[in-house]
C-alpha cells in the first residue's frame, strides 16, 4: 500500500494493473483526479442507492431506523469494496473523499435532523448531517484500515452500539 499521496501515479497504477500507462490515458483517464472521481462513484454507488432507496420509502424520518438499516444493509455493501475504502481512509488519504460524500449525502440525510434536539441549540440540519457523515467516516476508517477488518456482521453490531450511545456513556466507569 502506498505510504504517501506522492507515491500514487497513473504509471504505478498501470504497472499494478499490468497495462501500459498509455492504455490508461487512451482508454480511460487523463489524470489522477479523474480516476479518483471514477473510483468514488464505483465504491459509493451501491451504498448510495441503498440509502437513497431507504430514505425515499420513509414516511417519517427516524434516525434509529436509519442507523439500523445502515448497519444491516450498507455496511456489507461497503465491505465488498473494503480494499478501496481502506486506501481512501489510509495514511495516503484522499482529500476529495469527504467533500464527495458530503455533496452526495448532506441533503439526503437532512430530513432526519429537521426536528432534532440539536436544532434547538442552533445546529442546522445541514450541520448535523455533515457531523454525522464525519462521524461515520471516522468509524469506517478505524474499521477498514485494520490489517484484517472484522466481518460486516460483527462490525455492524459495534456500529449500532457506538451510534446508540454518547461518548459520555461509552467512557463512563463500570
Image (cartoon, grey):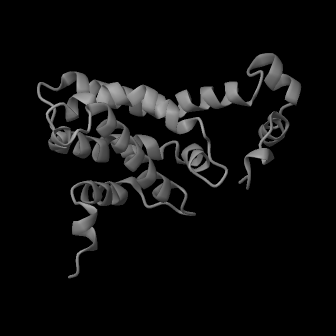
Q: Which quadrant of the figure has residue 169?
A: bottom left
Residue 46, given in percent of the width and then of the height, sits at 43, 30
- Residue 136 vs 147, above or below: the answer is above
Q: Residue at x 77, y 21 (%)?
A: 30
Q: Residue at x 82, y 17 (%)?
A: 26
Q: Residue at x 88, y 24 (%)?
A: 22
Depth check, front residue: 158 or 61: 61
Callout count: 0
Asked whether residue 54 appears in the rendered view, the answer is no
Q: Residue at the top extreme?
A: 26
**Quadrant into which the N terminus falls:** bottom right
**Quadrant into which the C terminus falls:** bottom left
- Residue 125 vs 132, above or below: the answer is above
Q: Residue at the bottom extreme?
A: 174
- Residue 89 vs 108, above or below: the answer is below
Q: Residue at x 22, y 60 (%)?
A: 165
Task: State left or right for residue 140 relative to residue 51.
Answer: right
Depth check, front residue: 106 or 85: 106
Q: Which quadrant of the figure has residue 56?
A: top left
Depth check, front residue: 54 or 117: 117
Residue 5, given in percent of the width and then of the height, sits at 73, 46
Asked whether residue 129 appears in the rendered view, the answer is yes
Residue 12, given in percent of the width and then of the height, sits at 82, 41
Amino acid at each position: 500500500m502506498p505510504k504517501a499521496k506522492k507515491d500514487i501515479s497513473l504509471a504505478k497504477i498501470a504497472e499494478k494493473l499490468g497495462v501500459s500507462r498509455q492504455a490508461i490515458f487512451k482508454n480511460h483517464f487523463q489524470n489522477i483526479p479523474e480516476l479518483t472521481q471514477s473510483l468514488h462513484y464505483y465504491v459509493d454507488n451501491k451504498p448510495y442507492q441503498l440509502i437513497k432507496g431507504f430514505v425515499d420509502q420513509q414516511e417519517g424520518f427516524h434516525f434509529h431506523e436509519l442507523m439500523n438499516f445502515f448497519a444491516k444493509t450498507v455496511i456489507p455493501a461497503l465491505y465488498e469494496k473494503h480494499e478501496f475504502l481502506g486506501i481512501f481512509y489510509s495514511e495516503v488519504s484522499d482529500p476529495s473523499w469527504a467533500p464527495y460524500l458530503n455533496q452526495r449525502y448532506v441533503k439526503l440525510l437532512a430530513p432526519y435532523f429537521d426536528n432534532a434536539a440539536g436544532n434547538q441549540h442552533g445546529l442546522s440540519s445541514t450541520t448535523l448531517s455533515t457531523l454525522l457523515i464525519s462521524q461515520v467516516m471516522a468509524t469506517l476508517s478505524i474499521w477498514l484500515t485494520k490489517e484484517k477488518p472484522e466481518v460486516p456482521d460483527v462490525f455492524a453490531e459495534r456500529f449500532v452500539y457506538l451510534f446508540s450511545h454518547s461518548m459520555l456513556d461509552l467512557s463512563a466507569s463500570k
